[in-house]
Amino acid sequence: MKKKNIWLLLFGVFAVTATVGGIFSATGYLNRQKANKTYEELQAIVNSAPSEESQGSEGGSAQMLTDGASQEAGAQENTLQGDGSGTDWGNGSAAMANARPAGQEEGFTESVELNAGAKRPDGKTGPASSKPDVTVTGKNLDWDALHKENADIYAWISVPGTTVDYPVLQHPTSNAYYLNRNMDGSKGYPGCIYTENYNSKDFSDLHTVLYGHNLKDKTMFSTLHNFEKNKLLQEPHYIYIYTESGVFTYEIFAAYEFPAIHLLANYDLSNEYVYAQYIKDVLNMDNTQARVANIRHDVEVTEKDKIITLSTCTTDHDASLRFLVVGVLRNS
């Protein structure tokens, strides 16, 4: 009799556990579907035809509509800290090697006009990219509406040729908040594209890092992995950051895997020497043992430039690594 009761009890516990697990799983699925639908609705609005005033001006000083008037542009997946143990980076320099652990397909084109007269080192037309002329396609951004959706939205990121076309958020108190929370505050995936409070929200820092998940449904930062293909970086590609004060245009010059350390916590980039060495190390990543390292050496980047890094998980979701796409600001 006692044995029977024990089996009944165990069965009951199993049934309850399965039911609760199913409820959480269903809730997570519904939250994810709702979040993706919200993003799709926002993308449809943002990418609808903007007014003529919001179109970028020619000649590299891109503009966008702000409060009824055009103004000139101004100025990991997991953020947990890791040590990258077991990863040999070969000939990487001291600045990279000594970091202290803390916490579409091929052939896509972009909505950018290039200086056709510039000669490239590879013999092709278009700028090799010292300071290319670009024209930015405008976005129909209603900041009041975006802030009603979530007050933490402060920018919009677009990477032509990928599915990256999302609002950018920063939580006022919790750096990891949007890692596993959606715009409506519900827990789960896909989460949000976000920055931490290590960075200001005006993109005035020397190095700004954005985080986003690598998901199977190709949302968020998943299609940044297009840049694992070396052929893609033989031509100019850009990251556009839209803010209320203007649009920032970054030219992509590096895409590589790197240990899952906290970049902003481990490198004192306010030190000019450290920042200069950091830039050199990024440009030298294709001379290390990194599994993926695509670098455009024809792009001029110095310690006087501002850079942006987009951080996500690797394709095999190796917890000790991150996949980083880095661009240099071109319209400051």
Image (tube, grey):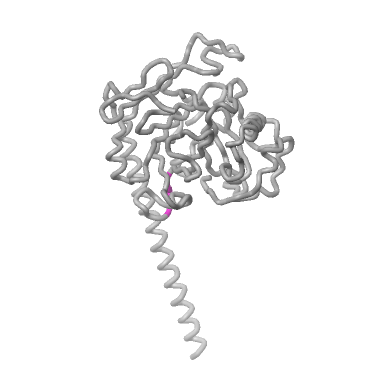
Q: Position of residue 296 (x, y in %)?
A: 60, 24
271 sits left or right of 9 in the view:
right
- Image location (x, y in percent) of residue 231: 57, 25
Q: Which SS type dominates the magenta stretch?
A: loop
Q: Is 191 included in the stretch rendered in magenta?
A: yes
Task: Give above or below for 299 relative to 117.
Answer: below
Q: Which residues are magenta?
A: 188-192
Farthest-out residue, top: 117
Residue 249: % across, % down: 45, 26
Look at the image and say whether residue 150 sits in the magenta stretch. no
Query: Which residue reaches farthest bottom?
Result: 1
Q: Please tell me which residue lies in front, 4 or 292.
A: 292
* Residue 297 location, quadrant: top right
How far from the left and from the top, in percent, is residue 210? Answer: 49, 40
Q: Is residue 24 left or right of residue 126?
A: left
Who is closer to the viewer here, 10 or 1?
A: 10
Residue at the extreme right: 91
* Residue at image coords 67%, 30%: 284
Q: Is residue 114 above or below residue 245?
A: above
User: Does 25 appear above or below 93?
Assistant: below
Q: Please tell me which residue is depicted at 41% across the width and 49% down the height of the picture.
A: 172
Residue 21 visible at all? yes
